Image: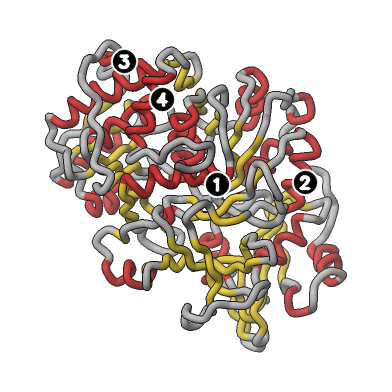
Amino acid sequence: MIGDGRARYPTVVHILDAAAKKAADQIALRCEQDEVTYAQYVRRVSGFAEYLRTLNVAGSRVALIMGNGIDICVTTFAAQSAGAQVAALNPGYTAYELEFLLIDCAPGAIVCDDTTAMTVMPLASKLGLPDPVVVGVHFALSRWDESAAPLGLPNPASLSTLQYTGGTTGRPKGIDLQHSAVATNVAQRDALLPTQPDERILVVTPLYHSYALAMGLYLSAWCRGTLIVVKRYRPDVTLDIIEKERITLFAGSATLFNGLMQHENFGTTDFSSLRLCFSGAAALPVETLNRWESATGSPICEGYGQSEAGPILTFNPRHGLRKPGSVGIPVPDTIVEIVDIESGLKQMPQGEAGEIRARGPQIMQGYRGRPDETRAALRDGYLYTGDIGKLDGDGYLHILDRKKDMAIVAGFNVYPREVEEVLCAHPAIVESAVIGVPDAYRGEALKAFIVLRSGADVSPKDIQTYLAERLTRYKIPNDVVICPALPKTPVGKIDKLQLRAHGKSAP
C-alpha cells in the first residue's frame, strides 16, 4: 500500500480497469466537443485491443504516430492491453526522422491518425512494415462503445513502454520500461502529490512524451478524474480552458508558464478552480514560480526525473515543506545520491555538487539494442542520470545542470543554470540559456542567449553589468545575445544543441 492507502496496481491497464468499475459514468476524457465516460473508455480499449491481437502484436511493439486527442489515449491502453509494448513517436516528425525510429523499434503494428497517415503509409511500405491502422473518420474507435470484449490485463513483468529520448545528444535511444515500473511510478507520484476523484486535469503537452503520460493520462485514470486534452497548445486556448473547464490540476513547464503569463488574456483569466500546478521537463526559474503563484494563487510543485526513471524520481510534496528552487524529495522506495563526477563511486558530502544517481522499482530495464550504453547508465543497480545536483540538509534535491552542460572556465566548474537563474530574475528578461563555448585562453567561456520582455530597452552591456553585481567574474558570460525567441525541442525544453551550433566559439 502507498500514499492514501490505495494498493499499487500491477499495470496501468489494471488502473484503468479499476477506474471503470468504480466510476463507470464519470467523464474520463474530453477533447474539444468530444467526451467519453470511463465505461466507454474501457470498451473502446478492450475492443481495439482485441482487434490488435488479430495482428499478432503480443510480445512485439505497436508504434503510435498520433496527435493529441481521445484516440491516442485509447490506443495507448489498447496496445498495452493487447500484450504489446507501446512506442509512441512524435507525430510532427518528418519521414526522414521517423525512418530511423521505425527501423529501431521494428513494430508489429503501426497506428496513426488521419493527420499523419500521408507521411506514415508510404514510409511503412518503403521499410517493409505492416500496413498502418489509420484511426479517424473511416476507422473510428467509437465503433467499440458497446464492445463486450474482455479487457486484457498484461503481465506486470512484460514490457509496457518503449520511450524514445529527445535525441538532443544524437540519435534517439529507446528506453525499455516494464509494466510494473510504470504502474509503481504512478503510485509513487501520488504519495507526494495526492489527488481526488473530482480532479479536472489539463494536459497540453504531447501525449507521446513521458511527462504527459505520467502527469496526465495515467494520473487521471489513477484518481478517476477527468482529463481535458488540448490538441495543439495555444496560450489563449489554454487560458480559456482553465477558466471554462474549471481545471484543478495543470501539468506545465517553465516555457508554458512563461508563455501564459506573457499573453494579453492572462490578467483577466479566472484561476480560482486551480488547486495545484506541476512543473517538469526542464528547470523552473524561481522568479517564474513566484510570479505565477502571486498572479494565480495556485502553487507549483516542481519535480525531477527522466524517461529512464519511469519517469519520476523526486517531487516537492503537495502537503508539506515545499522549497522553491528545489525539485523536492525522492518518491517512496527510491534512493537518490550525489556522487563524484569522475568515478561515480564516491558519495559527496551534503551540499556539494556531483552527479545524481538513483535506484528504485521504476528504473528502466535498459536501452533497446544498446548494451554498451545500458551498462554505462545502469551500474550496480543505480541509474546514472548525467545530471549535476546537490542535496540539502532536509534531503531536498537541487538540480544544477546537465553533466554535459557544465563548463570549465579557467579551471573553475560553472553550472549554466546558476547563471540562468540570475538572468531570469532580471525584470527585462523572459527566458535565458547559457552555454559553454571554446576559448583559447580560459579553455571555455560562457555565452548567454536572452529573450526580452516586450518594450524592454536594455543592452548586452547592461546585462553584463547586472550579472557582475551578483556573480563572481568567471561566471559572467563574455557574450550576451538578445534573441526574439529561443529554440525549443518538441516538448518545450530549450534546445541547447541548436544554440551550440550557433555559438561554437567565444568572441
Q: Amino acid at mark 4?
A: Ala
Which residue appears at 63% of the width and 62% of the height?
Answer: 395
Q: Residues within 10 Å of mark 2 (few under 14, many from 20)?
A: few
The first of marks 3 and 4 along the sequence is: 4
Of tags 1 and 3, the one toward the viewer is 3
Cβ–Cβ below 8 Å for labels 4 and 2? Answer: no
* Place of residue 265 in the rendered image (x, y in percent of width and height, measured from the top left): 74, 27
Instruction: Specify the quadrant that holds the C terminus.
Output: bottom right
Between marks 4 and 2, how big is the CA–CA gap?
36 Å
Of tags 4 and 2, the one toward the viewer is 4
Q: Amino acid at mark 2?
A: Asn
The first of marks 4 and 1 along the sequence is: 4
Between marks 1 and 3, how big is the CA–CA gap?
32 Å
State the residue position of label 4: 19
In the rendered image of this protein, does residue 185 appear above or below residue 236?
Answer: below
Disc 3 element: helix
Cβ–Cβ below 8 Å for labels 4 and 1? Answer: no
The numbered disc on residue 290 is 2
The first of marks 2 and 1 along the sequence is: 2
State the residue position of label 3: 142
The numbered disc on residue 492 is 1
Q: Amino acid at mark 3?
A: Ser
The first of marks 4 and 2 along the sequence is: 4
Of tags 4 and 1, the one toward the viewer is 4
Between marks 3 and 2, how big is the CA–CA gap?
44 Å
In the rendered image of this protein, does residue 459 appear above or below residue 127?
Answer: below
* Place of residue 280 in the rendered image (x, y in percent of width and height, measured from the top left): 57, 48
